[in-house]
Amino acid sequence: MARSPLLDFAFGYMPAQMLYAAAELRLADALTGGARTSGELAGETGTDPHALHRLLRALTCLGVLTQDGPDRFALTEEGRRLRTDAPDSIHGLLELFCGPDVWRSWGDLMETLRTGEPAWSRVTGMTSFEYLAEHHEQSVTFNKAMSEHTREVAPAFIEGYDFTRFGTIADLGGGDGTLLAAILRAVPAARGVLFDLPAGLKEADATLRAAGVADRCELVPGDFFESVPRGADAYLLKSVIHDWDDEQSVAILRTCRAAASADAKVLLLETVIPEMVTPEHRGIAMGDMNMLVCTGGRERTEEEFRQLLEAAGFALAGVTGPLPPSNYCVIEGTPT
């Protein structure tokens, strides 16, 4: 009898926690200089050498490490991405999505299915964004993970969508400015407005300066549920609307409509889930489930985006994408 491929999914929690442990222990950082033994690494990471040896051996089977001897381990090229200083690091993403808060929330999936309410609120006693506002360390991890993810998908937006037609681009909820910096570098004639809560903007100046675009970008703190800056030609919201339910999403879009001129555009950078899915849409569906568990938001179909935009005073002007190699689309709205 053939082994069911479903078992790989069923046991997927095991490699997820192994990768989280590797990230939390910063094993990749410790291996930057070359191969080391489990005893050497245990002394540096405060772990039991025998237990750590077994983890290192298992990480070798995942392609994170190579085994140079019975007890000598080194990073692979893919394992290098777990380094905190790697330009394509996924360290923050692993700490966020495999960390204890998300882990416990997914463990409460059955109650979410019974009630329709996100598990995160039951597990932590507050919404995800309230929690981040009160827990600085987790907020830093969240911002780092979002920056890593944005850095990975930014080239798809720049190559697949024409930003050159906009003189001023406002990135709403843009965090440390990773996406806006990439767009401004690609469009030298454009100016930017980076808008987020004060905590979200803490690293923005450094990001913009490193990209050489700080002189063309204004940092504006604020809350997009209350108001957003006026005067932009394009209002950009990447992975924002999927965090919220329909009522809250419309509220955000209405503040954009209040600020937008008749010629402005609102650009939603989101995944669009088809009405009929196949296994190739697994990444989008998994993202949707994570929103169900952790935020109460959702991934949406094109028709659902159309309804949100129309409720806020925009018309759906078009959908560009998916933009390879990502699953993202640019959903363009125009004021009505």
Image (cartoon, rainbow, N blue to C red):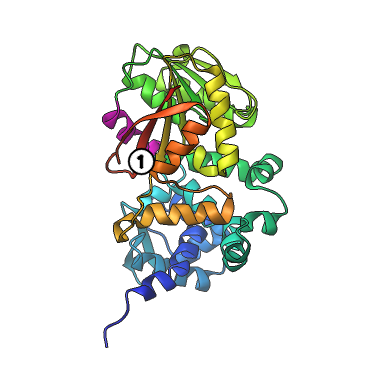
Residue at image point 49% right, 36% down: 308
Residue 271 visible in the current orientation: no
Which secondary structure lies at badge 1? strand
Main SS of residues in magenta: helix
Left or right of residue 199, residue 185 in this image? left
Residue pointed to by mark 1: 328
Left or right of residue 67, residue 140 in this image? right
Based on the displayed image, in which of its 4 quarters is residue 173 positioned?
top right
Name the foreground residue: 115 vs 109: 115
Q: Is residue 265 above or below residue 16?
A: above
Does the magenta segment cover residue 153? Answer: yes
Residue 307 visible in the current orientation: yes
Q: Position of residue 241 (x, y in %)?
A: 51, 38
Q: Position of residue 289 (x, y in %)?
A: 49, 57
Based on the displayed image, in which of its 4 quarters is residue 86 positioned?
top left
Q: Is residue 257 above or below residue 281?
A: above
Q: Which residues are magenta?
A: 150-161
Q: Amino acid at mark 1?
A: Tyr
Residue at image point 29% right, 57% down: 280
